[in-house]
């Protein structure tokens, strides 16, 4: 237990979601903490064509890296995952 939050971790089909039970009901991501700034950078300095690009996501909720990677792809189409 963290303060008045009871953390629960759900795993289904390879996806993980964090929820917290607050006094009065369920709240998604209630245990995630304060908003953060995240910068994701993709760089290749080994094989041509060389590249480096970044996306900064400001004041976002703390969550799984895969969610932040998808948001970066939505912002900049050069972020592609296979």
Image: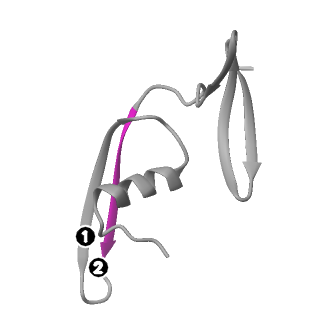
Task: Name the chief secondary structure element in magenta.
Answer: strand
Residue 47 part of the magenta segment: no
Under tag 1, what secondary structure?
strand
Q: Are marks 2 and 1 in contact (CB under 8 Å)?
A: yes
| Quadrant housing the N terminus | top right
Q: Residue furthest bottom?
A: 48
Q: Reading the chain from its start, which is encountered first: label 2 or label 1?
A: 2
Under tag 2, what secondary structure?
loop
Residue 59 x, y percent position in the rendering: 34, 33
Distance of label 2 from label 1 (alpha carbons): 8 Å
Q: In the shown orientation, is residue 42 left or right of residue 5?
A: left
Q: Which residue is mark 2?
A: 45
Magenta residues (range): 36-45
Q: Quadrant of residue 34 in the image?
A: top left
As displayed, is residue 33 above or below residue 3?
below
Q: Which mark is residue 52?
A: 1
Res. 80 visible in picture: yes
In the depicted view, which residue is nearer to us: 66 or 26?
A: 26
Residue 58 x, y percent position in the rendering: 31, 38
Residue 8 x, y percent position in the rendering: 75, 32
Residue 42 part of the magenta segment: yes
As displayed, is residue 24 above or below residue 56?
above
Q: Number of marks in the image?
A: 2
In the depicted view, which residue is nearer to us: 17 or 40?
A: 17
Res. 5 visible in picture: no
Depth-wise, is mark 2 or mark 1 nearer the camera?
A: 1
């Amino acid at each position: 237990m963290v303060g008045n939050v009871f953390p629960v971790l759900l795993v289904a089909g390879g996806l993980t979601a964090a929820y917290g039970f607050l006094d009065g009901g369920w709240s998604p991501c209630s245990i995630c903490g304060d908003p953060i700034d995240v910068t994701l950078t993709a760089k290749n300095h080994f094989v041509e064509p060389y590249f480096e690009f970044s996306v900064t996501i400001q004041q976002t909720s703390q969550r799984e890296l895969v969610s932040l990677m998808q948001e970066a792809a939505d912002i900049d189409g050069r972020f592609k995952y296979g």
